Image: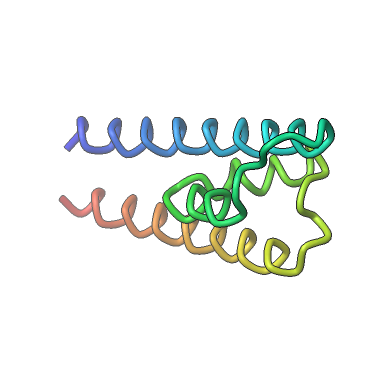
Amino acid sequence: MDTVVKSIFFYYVVMNLFTFILYGVDKRRAIKKEWRISERSLILASVMGGAFGAFLGMYVFRHKIRHTKFQLIIPLTVIVHFVIIYMLVVFLKKL
């Protein structure tokens, strides 16, 4: 069980760091008028576990903060992932 908890924690850390960096890279590319990372990819990274990194990346890099889609989906994914983590902690404590 301890290995499972560590694996889940590691996954979330890596996904959030990856997603945060992804938002920074896309912002830099937007400024330089270069090829961009698709909105679909940014949202998918959030849904796959990088919700906290996406939320932080939006505000640190001031990127996608005016897009209604991102204003709704990213905070929602943060809430969903918070609930998932909470439920996992509660479930794993019972084992």
Quadrant of the frame with the N terminus? top left
Residue placed most toward the observer, 63 or 4:
63
Residue 12 at what x, y percent from top left?
A: 43, 39
Residue 72 location in percent, x, y?
Answer: 67, 69
In screen coordinates, is 51 left or right of 65? left
At 64% from the left and 61% from the top, the residue drawn is 75
Rendered residue at 37%/35% (across/down)? 11
Q: Quadrant of residue 66?
A: bottom right
For image coordinates 60% across by 41% down, the residue present is: 53
The vertical placement of 66 against 6, above or below, is below
**Left or right, 41 with reference to 69:** left
- Model colouring: rainbow
Q: Residue at x 35, y 59 (%)?
A: 87
Taking depth in this image into account, of 43 and 15 the one nearest to the observer is: 43
Q: Nearer the viewer, residue 51 or 24?
A: 24
Viewer-side residue, 53 vs 38: 38
- For the image, the number of numbered tags is 0
Whether residue 62 sits left or right of residue 55 in the image: it is right
Quadrant of res 86: bottom left
